[in-house]
Amino acid sequence: QVQLVESGGGLVQAGGSLRLSCAASGSIFSINAMGWFRQAPGKQRELVAAFTNGGSIKYADPVKDRFTISRDNAKNTVYLQMNSLRPEDTAVYYCNAVVRDSGLLYFEVWGQGTLVTVSS
């Protein structure tokens, strides 16, 4: 079984910064893709930033030049550095990964979510 554990959410004023972390644990053979989604109240879940299966990085247009995704492969951890935060960034942020487990089966896994609130 593979689990994703997120941390780093909280309350911040507009213009401030936060760093989210997501660590994958369990019977992991490889991680094919990993990244962050968010869901604001009354809205659909949307991609924020992710490492794709091909190894490239994808950013949603609203966060380009403000957010940076990075990873530590040795720790199976991905980070999201969020700068110049805006009230519209307020959402629950979810970590997502496509993982191949020790049985060589592929799974899509979601974290429990971490709340980011940006006050104006």
Image (cartoon, rainbow, N blue to C red):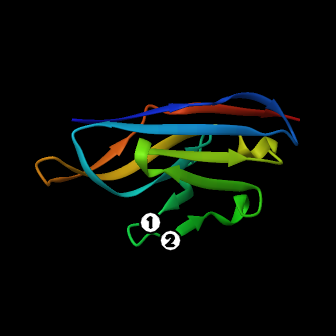
Residue 89 screen position, x and y as percent: 72, 45
User: What residue is rendered at 54% in x and 67% in y?
Assistant: 57
Q: Looking at the picture, does residue 1 appear above or below residue 70?
A: above
Near mark 2 (Cα within 10 A), the count class, few <14, some 14-19 or many ≥20, is few
Q: Which mark is residue 52?
A: 1
Image quarter hosting the C terminus: top right
Q: Which residue is labeled 2 in the image?
A: 56
Q: Which mark is residue 78?
A: none
| Residue type, numbered disc 1 | Thr
Image quarter hosting the N terminus: top left
| Residue type, numbered disc 2 | Ser
Name the secondary structure under disc 1.
loop
Residue 112 screen position, x and y as percent: 44, 31
Left-right relation of 106 to 73: left
Q: Are marks 1 and 2 in contact (CB under 8 Å)?
A: yes
Left-right relation of 108 to 119: left
Left-right relation of 68 to 54: right
Name the secondary structure under disc 2.
loop
